[in-house]
Image (spheres, coloured by chain):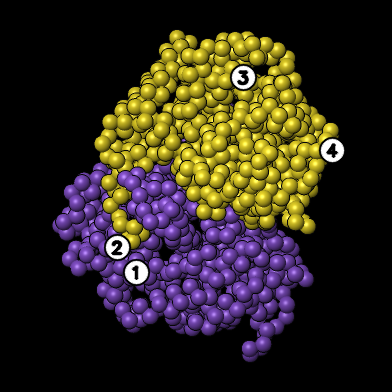
Chain colours: A yellow, B purple
Amino acid sequence: MPGYKAPLDDIRFLLHDVFKLEEFCAEFPAFEDVDTDTVNAILEEAAKLCEQVLAPIDASGDTDGAKRVDGGVQAASGFAQAYKAFSEGAWGALGGDPEYGGMGMPKTLVSAVEEMVQGSNMAFGLAPMLTAGACLAIQAHGSDQLKQLYLPKMYSGEWTGAMDLTEAHAGTDLGLMRTKAVPNGDGSYEISGTKIFITWGEHDMTENIVHLVLAKLPDAPKGSRGISLFLVPKFLPGDASELGERNNVHCGSIEHKMGIHGSPTCVMNFDGAKGWLIGEPNQGLACMFTMMNYERLVVGIQGIGVAESSYQTARDYALDRLQGRAPQGPLNPEQIADPIIVHPDVRRMLMEMKALNEASRAFYFYVARWLDTAKYAEDEGQRKIAGERVALLTPVAKSFMTDRALEVCVTGQQVLGGHGYIAEWGQDQKVRDVRITQIYEGTNGVQAMDLIGRKTVAAKGALMSSYIAEMREDLALAKDAGIDQSIADRFAEVVQCLEATTQFIVESSEPELSGAVAVDYLDMTGYVAFAHMWIMMLNVCTGQIASRVGIQGGKLSTANFYFAKVLPTISALEAKIKAGAASILSLESTQF
Amino acid sequence: MPGYKAPLDDIRFLLHDVFKLEEFCAEFPAFEDVDTDTVNAILEEAAKLCEQVLAPIDASGDTDGAKRVDGGVQAASGFAQAYKAFSEGAWGALGGDPEYGGMGMPKTLVSAVEEMVQGSNMAFGLAPMLTAGACLAIQAHGSDQLKQLYLPKMYSGEWTGAMDLTEAHAGTDLGLMRTKAVPNGDGSYEISGTKIFITWGEHDMTENIVHLVLAKLPDAPKGSRGISLFLVPKFLPGDASELGERNNVHCGSIEHKMGIHGSPTCVMNFDGAKGWLIGEPNQGLACMFTMMNYERLVVGIQGIGVAESSYQTARDYALDRLQGRAPQGPLNPEQIADPIIVHPDVRRMLMEMKALNEASRAFYFYVARWLDTAKYAEDEGQRKIAGERVALLTPVAKSFMTDRALEVCVTGQQVLGGHGYIAEWGQDQKVRDVRITQIYEGTNGVQAMDLIGRKTVAAKGALMSSYIAEMREDLALAKDAGIDQSIADRFAEVVQCLEATTQFIVESSEPELSGAVAVDYLDMTGYVAFAHMWIMMLNVCTGQIASRVGIQGGKLSTANFYFAKVLPTISALEAKIKAGAASILSLESTQF
């Protein structure tokens, strides 16, 4: 099984050449220390950790899995040591608040590290990902006391974080939840209830686990407006550096599931566990939303991370495996056969993987840059525009990146034929692991509803208009830079199609239309967004960069492939959307 | 986890109303005993076996898996008993040659049983599937002595069959194989070599296993024209009913793989094992082709079988699970929430599954009917036309049915959200099991190459023209029957598109075009073929059948959905094909 190689060349091209990270950081006082040397050092150190520490325990983590032992959970072999190495490298602090021990690096840079971590070992990557998410919520809404008590320990990797939202009967519909929080009178609360699907909810990698738990206060309003957020540690913090009392939160069982076996998915029982309110009462969902956009982007990043890894294995296999001959005759006459990469259909598969992965990588940097602007820009207007762009594109990043990632991983398995189906090459694990990204943090269908409902129809298309305007500006720049005319025309067409389709949806009087075409609309947005990324990449492929990246790195050819062979899907999506909701609704429930 | 229910209503509708099995059988002397009562009795008994015996051990077969024990292979718990029940029901004899103890039923009927067997337990279903395939090859090409010795025991289920083709370095490119066969001088041969990926190659369900092995005779021509087919039993048949000597064929190991854990995938070592030639020397591949079309259709049937099972679980879950409210307001105000089937996006997923599954089921009956005609028609011209239609559509049935099946199973998992990812509901197993159908018996890419190369370009489009002519005749019939005008127009359009695209490909001078667009062309053919099935179904949805199946069974609504929401994909495929090969070929191998 080939090893994972961090795609540093492409990451550097995107950070430095396309998204011009140094110029961007210079605009923000928070990032004044971020220079090219720092960035490159961080990327190279992260690559080392991922290639040498995390990737080698990816397959064994799948085979061994996290285990239920003595009422607790034992992490898969090697995971605890890897988490120690991760923490010693201060990787848990990378994006954290400097006031509490974080390094305060921009999300645009942190994202690159996240791709490498998730791509080399997604089951492992979930632990720091959930911890970072919990930190964000505590940092934004916790009291100063909670921040001082918890953030430094979580940034340092001494403690991990977990998000406890779902209950057996309350998944997407969180308003149905039953977990209760009763005030103790001393500022703390007693939490009781059972949560399911809690990722890294229990384990033995660190001495403590910090649960962020959604629960209902007594006399809370019904539904989702009556949910509050609580911090519930496994061990209460004690005096000085000692841990205090064991809290009444315990793991009831762990799930048997399709993949991410190295990551325990826990049922967590809260039996009068002690917790502290984060944010205002009944504002739990709003507090969660602070971190939601970050978390959802990381789920998309998990997709591209794993998809990149699948591509690497498929490419290596296609270059090595000898079967059959090239259509134009033997290319390797001295060998028994040619490598399978000579077959056009094998090349097609690799090109699809490459074209989608490279656009996907560009897209997360693009969204991350807007996240940074929304958080760190000094100008309020700039923050507002950025916040709206993030709101619009977060469901796209989460869903479109993960849907394409499954596609890529299935293709990466197909390239290997029967060898892709057996465990030996690791391609089957990638399909099984990446599949969850389409489901958790809000299913991709729910994301599509968010995009079309709240972000598009409710906003009367304004957020999409602003996005489309930006795409047209970038097209104008790329035309000035001399990109291929047929690509420019094709991009103008699909942007026009997205605009017209948005208008069609916003103006429709069919009440069920949004739900019925949500996924098609998200896909259309995603394919146009990826085309936009190719335009942005082509835009800088002039002069020296053109020969380094465009020609030798294959960017020009890959862009051509994307426009010729991937983008046509938009015409099908347009027709499906225009067909409306009627054919989806006409069957009675009893006829299914 | 809900149980599997055989889709008898739909099967009966297709067999009796659409494909008029009784009228069809009356045309063939071989099928003169096949009447409606026999057909219905067979279907009902098969349904019982599948629902009550095979389905209950599907999940446990996945969890336990076949195990390597004492140099042999132990079938998963309950599998041996189930195979006994299968055999006692004479299900292994259903399609067999009556001269050797078979029941001689038409493939059109056998296919329905195959769907139920594969849908209720695919890992189990592989054992009878491979046995039936081996029987076909022996029956068509074996000496009378071999037929008398082996067929009765294999039809009765006392012995199973296995196909030993692949070697570690010779998968798609069988010409590279190294397994040798040396004549013993007594009519038998000594077989030496190692085969991999041998499904049910070793197990303890039956007393004997009959391997059909591809190997090379001394001085055989190089490549695929030097391959011969041999019969190599695990135990040599002895006197009377006693088994003779143990043969030198042994299982070296079994694979760890993504799914079908109940089906052992074996490395088989032949160390001077005794075997007998089947067919002529160096004609091994031709002998294999006799059964290939049957086997490949059954792989497609595995797809729809598992996809149907996934649909049933998704539908039951969607009707039961309460989350959120319908877009038009609460439909279940007395409950905490509405069942998720009220959400248009959930209905969309179920409609996609239903529309694809029902067309897929119709399509295997359609192809099976042509298989029967090719084999049993008295008129040679009729046999020839049928043989050509089978040759054209076998790669479509194998690939398109299994590609859509993975799609359906992934969707069926998505409907359940997080519950689809954990093992409890069985939806994850279906994705893992069905995934292999896209790979084995020739990967779907290889099937697409076969369709576009040998079956289309080499035939100058003649086979496709004849198929298109039939589709137009069926459209004319359906128009006479009064089907919806817009559906008729749309079908005429896509048939026209397939015709024009075929012409474009046949006339192209671009040497790599075929390979580059093979999969897109196969998909286009598949979507049109499924549309044809909907036209054939709508054609009989008049009078009483219309109210029974069309309205109440939802056929009319589902057909509308297929034409409105699935078929538009063809426009994207057309554009991709027209874009040619250039963008696939421009990258150098080193640039991947």
Q: Is residue A151 visible?
A: no
- Judging from the image, mark 1 belongs to the subunit labelled B
Q: Which mark is residue A15?
A: 3
Amino acid beneath label 4:
Glu
Amino acid beneath label 3:
Leu
Q: In the depicted view, which residue is nearer to us: B139 or A443? A: A443
Query: Along the horizontal axis of the image, is B306 left or right of A303?
Result: left
* Image position, residue A314 (x, y; %): 62, 40
- Quote the CA–CA distance across marks 3 and 2: 56 Å
Residue that mark 4 sits on: A242
Q: Are marks 4 and 3 on the same chain?
A: yes
- Quote the CA–CA distance across marks 4 and 3: 42 Å
Where is the N terminus of chain A found, in terms of image quarters?
Answer: top right
- Judging from the image, mark 4 belongs to the subunit labelled A
Amino acid beneath label 2:
Gly
Mark 3 or mark 4, which is nearer the start of the sequence? 3
Q: Are marks 3 and 1 on the same chain?
A: no
List the single residue furthest toward the front: A185
- Judging from the image, mark 2 belongs to the subunit labelled B
